[in-house]
Image (cartoon, helix red, strand yellow):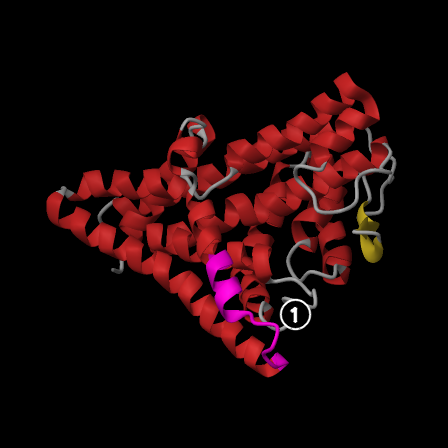
Amino acid sequence: MVFPLSVTFPVAALAAVLEAACGYPPALLPAIGHPVMWIGALIDMLDTALNRPDFSEQKRRMMGILALILIIGVPLWVTEAVLDLGSRALPAPLMLGVQAVAACTLVAQKSLWEHVRAVGTGLRQGGLAGGRQAVAQIVGRDTAALDEAGIVRAALESLAENFSDGVVAPLFWTALFGLPGAVFYKAANTADSMIGHLTPRHAAFGWAAAKLDDVVNLPASRLAALCLILAAPAERRAAARAAVRRDAPRHRSPNAGWPEAAMAGALRLRLAGPRLYKGVRVDDAWMGNGTPDATVADLDRGLVLYRRACLILVGVLLVGALLFMIPA
């Protein structure tokens, strides 16, 4: 089912507003779970069934491609079936609202804000132990030995990267294709999160998921960086732009460096750099040329920057929705 931009842009704009205001109702989690959990259950099942240790590397890669087709195809098929049934029973304006409500469950503006703010609260109320415990909820690196600067940098890097793939990307794909676009993106992104790792088990099986995730996040990462640059204080915008041009191409990820560099330049910090994952040192390039000695006050400034960037993104979607809804 293909929707015109006069439908998809309003769906994206309404989804962004609804999610920012309400988030995902906590009462629904024990009752029905979350759409990402449903996709994750499918991925787990396919990983168990198709990623056999006795398969050759080539066969694992082929099975990974098949799994990715199913990971994306099954949720899309369900989405299309529900939308088809709904369009037969409900008027178009109400179906637009249905799409927006469903799409907003795949956006993470509010939850990202809450999780990153919790890191600052943990540091203020529980010291390093509280900060480490809170930041461990949102990053995959080793946190046991992080000092305050390391905790804050980790939280800001997560804020920047997840602004791109948890907020901008699902809304970008929604604006293009409506709810099916959001489902497509979230399935691809969840697949990468779960199986797109260079571990012995998933190096071949998750190859296709990792490559697809790089592609689908490419436009959103650039848009996220632009939103962060525009959200920066006027006197820091040039520095944020310079950091993106200079440092983003040096990041090991083709996408994560863009919002991280923009965040670093806007806040006068250095982000990324070397860190530990499961005891293994990863020598990432530094993003930004400011100080690495980040403080809780810098985390507060990063959250303000994030909120401004979200407002800019929502404003663009609302303007786009109005423009596409107005008859030519």
Left or right, residue 280 beside residue 214: right
Q: In the rendered image, which residue does mark 1 sit on?
A: 203
- Relative to 160, 90 lies left or right: left
Which of the two residues, 63 or 179, is positioned nearer the viewer here?
63
Occupied quadrant, residue 298: top right
Residue placed most toward the observer, 317 or 47: 47
Q: Specify the principal SS of the magenta part.
A: helix
Query: Which residue reaches farthest top?
Result: 125
Single out the residue that lies furthest toward the front. 54
Element assignment for label 1: loop
Closest to the observer, 87 or 242: 87
Question: Residue 53 lies in magenta, yes or no?
Answer: yes
Q: Residue at x 70, y 64 (%)?
A: 199
Name the residue type under label 1: Ala
Vertically, is 214 above or below 154?
Answer: below
**Residue shown at 51%/57% (left/top)?**
44
Q: Is residue 51 visible?
A: yes
